[in-house]
């Protein structure tokens, strides 16, 4: 165990935590904005109640996304100073743009939305939640463009041992980013959809109030549509992996040697012939490069070394992502069919929706493990090794201390967030109108 | 171009210290100025809509350093490793505390997080920059105490400007006390920085104390804001020749292409940011009254 290992653990731990909360922020923000828009359009009270209810859950989660994000921006400099010095010229630009174009908008308009219910005209107030939600989505674009550059660097040259940007437009329209941005954002909508479905399912089991059916229907539509985008962009990504990151593709499939008509492996030993070649090129007879042959080629190109990422993690995270992600989407399609034309949500479906809550989160995390562990041993593909990226002056003790502090702090706060969310989900939406007098209500109307 | 980006980064840091300076002060003072939970909420409500936007100034300043001077960015944060970890811990517990306070059954933990999370960074930023300039532990400690008291003063003046009733009255008392305490500290700290902005900052602090005494709260806040800004300006004036020991700005800078692109983006977007953040302060310009 050295500082490099711990720095990698720290990056992994902090990023995984960050990305438990952020997808919910991205998707739920737009969902809440949609609910508030529905209230404006229809004037129906239950949309206002849902807006405030999911708005509160959104804010509880938003806080965690923000505070776990701050660490990200600093730890490049703290633990990865060699990396930062090498890439800052290119990688820093989207980060600065993210702050200027997205974070200011997100935080300022969210503040206006939270405290502006009574102080702003209704339309302006509605515009504030949209601005905040769009800000979140914009920030995802910039950071994902920066991340895509690590895997497929474009628009730069290396001068005096440092990357120099030559074309900002190329960095922002990197083909890897164009495939990855909609893939991750759509996956975030699936996470948010799964969250709303679980909450609505819980309340449908308790009350059957019509407002929960409409919340569930909206989330089912959102999840199913996002599922289509995820599948389409996933296919784009597979074709790009074939060209740009063949080692990741081969490791995700456990393909040892260059193979014509390569099979798609469902699990070790269960294979469908030619499907991998077809998925990655459109031609079932095409040759897909294998791990060992790529290793030999990389050694010839970059010198001796191990250019294979951790095979078990990459292989299995790909399957977890596919199975859990697609089952959430499948559930939403099933739900749409079962609730078509005013049909009620069956109880067993509500139970399933509650039980399925962890799936999209796990799929999201697995996707990131596939993406970033599959990139190893490089931080910048073909240019900079992870081992050469770490801060030379930072000691093992320092990294160990910060790793311990952040892991414990994040762990404690994550538990607190789950408890807090549960508490507010159980409490349910507050009544927007004055509560009617209890004696006038029939018991059957009460819940 | 390199000079322009140094000025932009100094501007972003200065904006951060001026804005988050008062919300650090409010964060620390809120529980001590309140006799009732409603008074506590009243204080925190003055920063509720704006603190997160204020913090983005830090994110932008650091992002801009990363993009424009990568070696400076990585040098500062890898060499001040543990202070930065503690600053981050402070900002984390503070952010969560402020957002969750109204939503938990018992806000005591949130209040502890807000106080600690405001006091730690207020102290550590001063300590970090003092250490960067003077490379000595006593200087760092002194710098930390100075910025902590400065934030308390700035926050107390802000509270006396933005609240009504007993909180306003007590905030004024705290502003006078911290105003008296900071003058001797300022004489030492700012003469060590020894430049024109530092001298004007000293005058601004004296004026701020006098204006608080005469109940000119708006003007008093303008002078404490100016004092924070000028102190920051004095720090960056010193850093200009050596952003880190043995480093020059030119050697740390990104290429001219990146700096040109960033300049266009900054020039186009920053005015919008200033306008809509300014608008937030306008929307919430009224004093926060005590909730019934």
Image: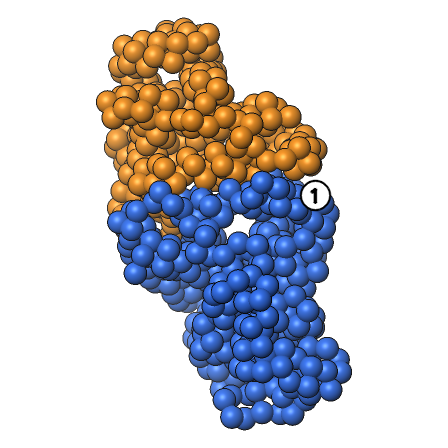
Chain colours: A blue, B orange
| Quarter of the figure with residue A193 | bottom right
Tell me the quarter of the image containing the C terminus of chain B: top left
Instruction: In this rendered view, identify the residue nearer to me: A178 or B117.
Output: A178
- In the picture provided, is A107 more to the left or to the right than A427? right
- In the picture provided, is B104 more to the left or to the right than A208? left
Q: How many marks?
A: 1
What residue is rendered at 59% in x and 35% in y?
B254
Q: Where residue A339 appears, x then y in whole percent?
A: 62, 82
Tell me the quarter of the image containing the N terminus of chain B: top right
What residue is rendered at 37% in x and 55% in y?
A4
Category of crowding for the residue at label 1, using alpha-carbon neighbours closer than 10 angstroms: few (below 14), some (14–19), many (at least 20) = some
Q: Is residue B173 above or below residue B77?
A: above
What residue is rendered at 51% in x and 93% in y?
A269
Q: Where residue B249 appears, x then y in whole percent?
A: 53, 27
SS type, badge 1: loop
| Quarter of the figure with residue A121 | top right
Q: Is residue A202 above or below residue B120?
A: below
Q: Which residue is mark 1?
A: A166
Instruction: In this rendered view, identify the residue nearer to me: B201 or B213.
Output: B201
What residue is rendered at 63% in x and 35% in y?
B255
Q: Is residue A26 above or below residue B232?
A: below
Instruction: In this rendered view, identify the residue nearer to me: B59 or A354.
Output: B59
Q: Residue furthest right?
A: A283
Q: Where residue A69 appears, x then y in whole percent?
A: 46, 50
Residue A53 makes an appearance in the image:
no
Chain that bears disc 1: A
Instruction: In this rendered view, identify the residue nearer to me: A259 or B274.
Output: A259
Residue A142 makes an appearance in the image:
yes
Q: Is residue B52 above or below residue B263?
A: below
């Amino acid at each position: 165990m050295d500082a490099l290992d711990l720095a990698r653990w720290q990056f992994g731990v902090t990023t995984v935590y960050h990305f438990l909360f952020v997808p919910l922020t991205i998707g739920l923000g737009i969902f809440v904005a949609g609910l508030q828009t529905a209230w404006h359009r229809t004037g129906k009270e239950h949309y206002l109640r849902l807006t405030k209810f999911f708005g509160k859950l959104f804010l509880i989660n938003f806080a965690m996304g923000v505070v776990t994000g701050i660490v990200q921006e600093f730890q490049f400099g703290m633990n990865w100073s060699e990396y930062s010095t090498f890439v800052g010229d290119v990688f820093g630009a989207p980060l600065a743009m993210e702050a200027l174009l997205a974070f200011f908008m997100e935080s300022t308009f969210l503040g206006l939305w939270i405290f502006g219910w009574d102080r702003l005209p209704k339309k302006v107030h509605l515009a504030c939640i949209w601005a905040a939600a769009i800000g979140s989505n914009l920030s995802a674009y910039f950071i994902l463009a920066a991340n895509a550059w690590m895997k497929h660097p474009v628009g730069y040259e290396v001068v005096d041992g440092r990357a120099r940007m030559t074309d900002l437009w190329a960095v922002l329209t990197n083909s890897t980013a164009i495939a990855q941005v909609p893939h991750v954002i759509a996956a975030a909508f699936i996470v948010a959809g799964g969250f709303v479905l679980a909450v609505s399912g819980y309340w449908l089991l308790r009350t059957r109030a019509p407002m929960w059916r409409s919340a569930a229907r909206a989330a089912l539509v959102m999840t199913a549509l996002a599922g289509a985008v995820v599948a389409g962009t996933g296919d784009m990504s597979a074709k790009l992996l074939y060209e740009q990151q063949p080692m990741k593709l081969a490791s995700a499939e456990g393909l040892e040697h260059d193979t014509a008509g390569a099979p798609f492996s469902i699990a070790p030993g269960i294979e469908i012939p030619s499907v991998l070649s077809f998925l990655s090129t459109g031609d079932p007879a095409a040759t897909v490069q294998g791990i060992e042959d790529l290793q030999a080629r990389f050694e010839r190109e970059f010198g001796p070394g191990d250019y294979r990422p951790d095979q078990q993690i990459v292989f299995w995270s790909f399957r977890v992502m596919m199975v859990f992600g697609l089952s959430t989407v499948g559930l939403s399609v099933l739900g749409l069919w079962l609730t078509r034309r005013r049909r009620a949500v069956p109880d067993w479906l509500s139970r399933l929706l509650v039980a399925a809550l962890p799936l999209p989160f796990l799929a999201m995390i697995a996707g990131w493990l596939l993406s970033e562990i599959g990139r190893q041993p490089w931080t910048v593909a073909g240019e900079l090794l992870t081992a050469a990226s770490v801060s030379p002056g930072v000691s093992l003790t320092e990294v160990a201390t910060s790793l311990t502090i952040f892991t414990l702090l994040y762990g404690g706060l994550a538990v607190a967030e789950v408890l807090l969310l549960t508490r507010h989900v159980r409490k349910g939406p507050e009544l927007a109108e004055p509560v009617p007098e209890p004696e006038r209500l029939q018991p059957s109307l009460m819940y | 171009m390199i000079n322009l980006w140094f000025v932009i980064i100094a501007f972003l840091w200065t904006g951060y210290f001026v804005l988050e300076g008062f919300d650090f002060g409010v964060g620390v003072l809120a529980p001590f100025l309140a006799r009732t939970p409603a008074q506590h909420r009243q204080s925190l409500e003055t920063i509720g809509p704006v603190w997160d936007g204020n913090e983005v100034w830090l994110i932008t300043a650091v992002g801009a350093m990363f993009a424009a001077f990568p070696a400076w960015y990585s040098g500062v944060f890898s060499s001040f490793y543990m202070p930065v970890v503690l600053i981050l811990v402070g900002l984390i517990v503070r952010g969560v505390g402020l957002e969750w306070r109204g939503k938990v059954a018992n806000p005591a933990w949130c209040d502890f997080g807000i106080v600690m999370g405001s006091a730690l960074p207020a102290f550590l930023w001063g300590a970090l920059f003092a250490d960067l300039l003077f490379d000595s532990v006593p200087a760092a400690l002194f710098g930390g105490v100075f910025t902590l008291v400065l934030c308390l003063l700035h926050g107390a003046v802000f509270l006396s400007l933005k609240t009504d009733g007993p909180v306003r009255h007590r905030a004024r008392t705290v502003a006078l006390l911290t105003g008296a305490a900071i003058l001797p500290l300022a004489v030492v700290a700012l003469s060590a920085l020894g430049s024109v902005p530092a001298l004007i900052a000293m005058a601004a602090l004296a004026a701020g104390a006098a204006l608080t005494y005469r109940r000119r709260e708006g003007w008093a806040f303008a002078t404490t804001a100016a004092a924070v800004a000028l102190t920051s300006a004095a720090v960056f004036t010193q850093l200009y020749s050596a952003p880190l020991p043995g480093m020059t700005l030119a050697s740390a800078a990104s290429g001219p292409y990146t700096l040109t692109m960033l300049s266009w983006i900054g020039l186009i977007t920053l005015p919008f940011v200033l306008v809509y953040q300014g608008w937030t302060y306008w929307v919430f310009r009224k004093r926060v009254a005590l909730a019934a």
